[in-house]
Image (spheres, helix red, strand yellow):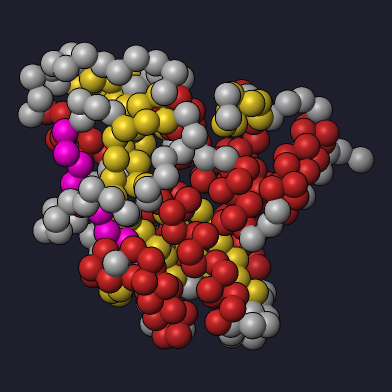
Amino acid sequence: MGRTFDIIPLRSLVAVAATGGVHRAAASLALTQSAVSQHLRRLEREAGCPLVRRDGRGIAFTPAGEELLSHARTILVAHDAAAARFDSPPGAAVVIGAAQNSSAVVLPMVIGKLRESFPGTEVRIHLDRNSTVRSMLDSGTVDVAVTTRVAPELSARTEGFRLRWLWSTRHGQPEPGAVTPIITFSAPCTLRQPSFDAFSALPGGWHVAAEVNDLATGLEATRAGVGAMLVPVLDRLPDGLAALQCAPPPPAIQLGVAYTERTPADVRETITTVLGEQLGPERVEMLHNRTFPMPA
């Protein structure tokens, strides 16, 4: 019999990449850290090679891990689409699509409250790019999409939910006026153009040091000293990372709770209320999916 990669461990693998570590992945999946670690070891046994490695206090993917991660995303999209097609009657499951660049901030707040508010209902999460979860919402694969939007009309914050430029704690900060290396998500991405715009006005300017497809890879590149990365955070920064001292002020950020006619009203309202209580009501906007602009 050939190799078999089960769905549940693959979901843990994708969550680790999307949230940046085992602890945050466990919180987003409502599992223990031990369970997520066991899932990773199980995948490594099946693959016959290491998929992740320790890098300081964080986790980095090996080349084989990056390859399996790409397959895992494809498998999960197909699996979740099939599950949605043949699922139980309406109301038996709620599937949330969430932008991975803010998933570590969003999911721990939402998942527990949803399960408390809808007992007996299965709550599933799909982490991906803003544009992907918006498309999945249109196709009916997810019930609601929690996306990230730069909101220049809002005042920037110095605490709480906000964007911050991060730099490695293991490498010296760049000199003022020097060219700043930037790590950015590949297009399309909400934070890509604001990253470029922010440094264009500075004397030293910027250059793209790395483009990444998931949050974990971006954070690992930042820890390794490849460059600075613009990331949504709460007050606690990810391990091994500090604020970039010479960074320009980042723009304000807002979460969008996108829905369609198929989205249960109580689901979209519960998510919006929970996020508003935690982040501030002005930082959360609920609108029909047609009214949200797609990220550049």
Examine the rendered structure and indicate whether residue 124 appears above or below residue 265.
above
Examine the rendered structure and indicate whether residue 141 appears above or below residue 183.
below
Measured from the top left, where is residue 240 in percent x and y? 47, 29
Q: Is residue 255 magenta?
A: yes
User: Is residue 66 among the parts visible in the rendering?
Assistant: no
Residue at image position (60%, 66%) is: 124
Q: Which residues are magenta?
A: 248-257
Q: Is residue 42 left or right of residue 33?
A: right
Q: Is residue 216 left or right of residue 135?
A: right
To which quarter of the image does residue 89 belong? Answer: bottom right
Front residue of 194 and 275: 275
Residue at image position (55%, 82%) is: 117
Measured from the top left, where is residue 285 in percent x and y? 27, 69
Measured from the top left, where is residue 61 in percent x and y? 60, 29
Front residue of 141 and 271: 271
Q: Is residue 70 magenta?
A: no
